[in-house]
Image: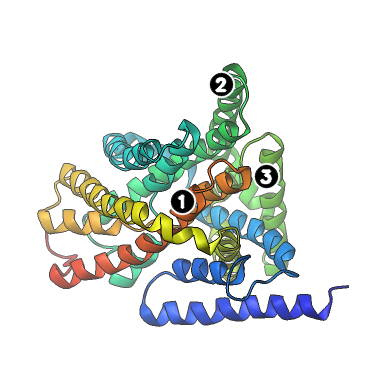
Amino acid sequence: MPGSLFLIELGVAVLVLAALARVAARLGFSPIPLYLLAGLALGEGGVVPLVTAEGFIGAGAEIGLILLLFSLGLEYSARELVDALRTTTSAGAADLLLNFTPGLLAGLVLGWGPVPAVLLGGVTYISSSGVIARTLQDLGWMGNRETPTVLAILVIEDLAMAGFLPLATVLLVGGSAVRVGVSVVVALALVVAVLALAARFGPALSRAVFSRSDEALLLGILAVLLLTAGATEALNVSAAVGAFLAGIAFSGPAADRARFLLVPLRDVFAGVFFLFFGFEIDPATIPRSLGPALGLAAAGVASKVATGWVAARRVGVGSRGRLRAGAALVARGEFSIVIAGLAVAAGAEPELGPLAATYVLLLAVVGPVTTRLVEHRFPARPSATP
């Protein structure tokens, strides 16, 4: 049975998350940076380290990651992913070139090996779908001409992560070039196969799981989610990828109901995930990461604004809409932390975790602030041409 200290520490952690969520809601930005700061304060080397409950929080963090990626997958269908690839391939390529390159070059300049440098490229490349979607809704930008382009870029990035995360896992494990190549091919083949099966049998799966009983539906969805995540993990593909693909497989009433039922559960465990990542970082390493993180953050703002500008211009959006599209893409968050978490767990590069944490802390705040500044300077007018 859990001891009193375990329950007290767990209660403290949950109370801190609750307070920070309230502060973030009042200030109007994502709670992710606050959760990361709380993890730094409550982890080893922090102000009030939690020792007894750390194991349980670690398990909760893994569940949080799975729920986070599953919820993201629910936002897309296999058909939407294919259509996004067809219509915005050039914008997606520009996004990759402009945003992956700064992280890759920074890692090499810092003297890291090629694998940590590639992972840092992934950290700087991927925008935060969760933060950006929330910001678009808060500002009333969903009806803007540039918004479909922003969402299409996010879809391509999320799909790219379905391939990148298995690659990162294989590279971290290491081995001969042949073994790495075979593992990557297997992982990508699995992703393609699941997408094909989701397009073909997703509606049937959704009908089989759907129930008018919330309890039965939630348990059925969680069973499919955990089994898929566990199966992909057993095949040396990230459980996060399995969760994302499982979300894509659901459609129709089952997906709509799943979004409603899972939001509270996802938010709780996602907060635990970001908290636990902060646990893994020694606060003493943050100051020496601040300089590189500031440089990368400045480059990240410029590169994402350029991405949005170019992508929106290609579909005929005016200069104000292009600027709004670029500002909307600035925020980094969940996937950047997922990538850094893989590196931290594998011990790939001691500096990668602190640098990624500081980088996300900066841009998870700067992104929403930038969009609000742009909205103040160039108010959106959905009924008019931007």
Q: Is residue 98 above or below residue 337?
A: above
- Name the residue at 68% across, 40% down: 233
Residue 13 circle label:
none
| Residue at disc 2, secondary structure | helix
Residue 228 circle label:
3
- Which comes before the other along the chain, label 3 or label 1? 3
Q: Which residue is mark 1?
A: 336
How far apart are the alpha carbons under marks 3 and 2? 23 Å
> Residue 34 in the image: x percent, y percent?
47, 71
* Residue 236 in the figure: left or right of residue 136: right
Q: Amino acid at mark 2?
A: Gly
Q: Is residue 80 visible?
A: no
Q: Which residue is mark 2?
A: 181
Q: Is residue 14 visible?
A: yes
Q: Amino acid at mark 1?
A: Ser
How far apart are the alpha carbons under marks 3 and 1? 22 Å
Nearest-to-viewer mark from 3 and 1: 1
Q: Amino acid at mark 3?
A: Thr
> Residue 56 in the image: x percent, y percent?
73, 65
